[in-house]
Image: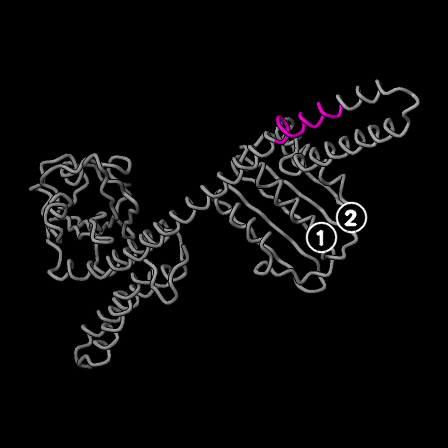
Amino acid sequence: MDTQAGAPTGATRAHGPLTRRLRALRNRLNVADHSDCGEMRRLAEERGALQQVAMLVARGSSPSVIFNAAACALGGLIKADYTAINRYEGDRTMSIMAFWRAPGTPDIGPPFGGRWTLGDDTPSAAVLRGHKPCSRASATIRSDIGGWHRAHRIGHAVACPVIVDDDLWGTMTALYLGTDPPKCDVEERMGKFVELLNCAIIQAKTRCELITSRARLVTGADATRRRIERDLHDGAQQRLISLALRLREAEETVPPEHRELRQRLSEAVQDLTGTVDELRELSVGLRPPALAVRGLDAALAQLVARSPVPVELNIDAGRRLDEEIEVSLYYVVSEALTNVLKHANASMASVDLEKEDTRVRLTVRDDGVGGADPGRGSGLTGLRDRVEALGGTIKITSPPGHGTSVVVTIG
């Protein structure tokens, strides 16, 4: 169902608190007493750190990039020795999504390889119970993570809740070496970064839901296509072939003097044979047999051989790909070559397929007139949905007078 015009999405709603926070910081900066240079400097640092991460959120950067940037910006702002962004898991463990250390501090790495047991006396456990920030000295933590803190001379930990859509998602945590406690405003300043993480997490959830939805649509369409192909082969084609054979038998039993009847039966057999051939071609168009039997390389070779426009095919031969990937790449080439024939007025085209480990790169180029608009063609839009449903990207470049290039990367 289409989103109602003007209705804010989750990511858009998440930017409201962020915008208000930055506006408040700007106002405080403008009205601050110029004699208080320390306060001015603190506000400027806070604003700069928030804007740095906010730009990544607005650009739609990946959650890992935003988390790492937030952990780094926060650590520098509150003068922490280490910062971490942790996610609550259902088995009372914490997964570390980002871990930062200040320059010059020991490289201790994320605790327990990136996942640790929550315990009952940790700051994160207190946040889980009360949904509010908590600061605790490592000496008072008897859980395993407390022992890890003391082994690495971490004296204090401060955890701030990350709440997304009214649900507690995880914590942002600051760690301090030595015995001196952190400043009293650390929890307040950490809370401002939580709003940025909310934006990033909501964007990630929305994108994940979109990709999952696309994948369901693509998978459903492929299943329907295979069912139609099977029904054509096992149903209509077989019945028509059987009918043609029976008519041929009837034709042979007609006495020679009934030439007109024999002629009509012969024409009916020919018409049925033509219909069977058309159905076979239609079923081949749904999914060529070579793709299922011999793989993408053979299917592309057949596709290129049928093209009226000369096509140079370059394939980095190697392993078979997953069926979904092979089907998607085949349709990308098929649609691209169809557009070359219909619109490009090209003298030649090329198809390049590179396979390397888990990464696949497909490039289709032509020397035609260019000027293709991906936003106006439903075929290209469908290809984009199909490729992005597999976690891939598709880039279409078509400057007027300089041909068109379609580049697909998966993995």
Q: Residue furthest left?
A: 140
* Left or right of 294, for residue 345: right
Circle 2 residue: 309
| Frontmost residue, 163 versus 2 | 2
Give the distance between the C-alpha atoms of the residues marked 2 and 1, in whole angstroms: 8 Å
Circle 1 residue: 340
Mark 2: amino acid: Val
Q: Name the dominant secondary structure of the magenta segment.
A: helix
* Left or right of 404, for residue 30: left
Q: Is residue 237 magenta?
A: yes
Q: Residue furthest right?
A: 257
Q: Quadrant of the N terminus?
A: bottom left
Question: Dot 2: within a 10 Å radius of its alpha carbon, few (fewer than 14), some, or many (20 or more) residues?
Answer: some
How does the figure colour the protein chain or chains? one colour
Q: Is residue 243 above or below residue 362?
A: above
Residue located at (28% from left, 53% from top): 71
Q: Where residue 395 sits in the image (x, y, percent)?
A: 57, 53
* Left or right of 157, for residue 62: right
Task: Tell me which corner region of the image, top left, top right, bottom left or bottom right, holds residue 342.
Answer: bottom right
* Left or right of 52, for residue 389: right
Look at the numbered disc 2 and give the secondary structure of its residue.
loop
Instruction: Point out the stretch of residues depicted in magenta.
Output: 232-245
Q: Is residue 310 magenta?
A: no
Q: Earlier in the sequence, mark 2 or mark 1?
A: 2
Mark 1: amino acid: Val
- Marks 2/1 in contact by CB < 8 Å: the verdict is yes
Task: Tell me which corner region of the image, top left, top right, bottom left or bottom right, holds residue 271.
Answer: top right
Question: Dot 1: within a 10 Å radius of its alpha carbon, few (fewer than 14), some, or many (20 or more) residues?
Answer: many
Residue located at (31% from left, 58% from top): 199
Look at the numbered disc 1 and give the secondary structure of its residue.
helix
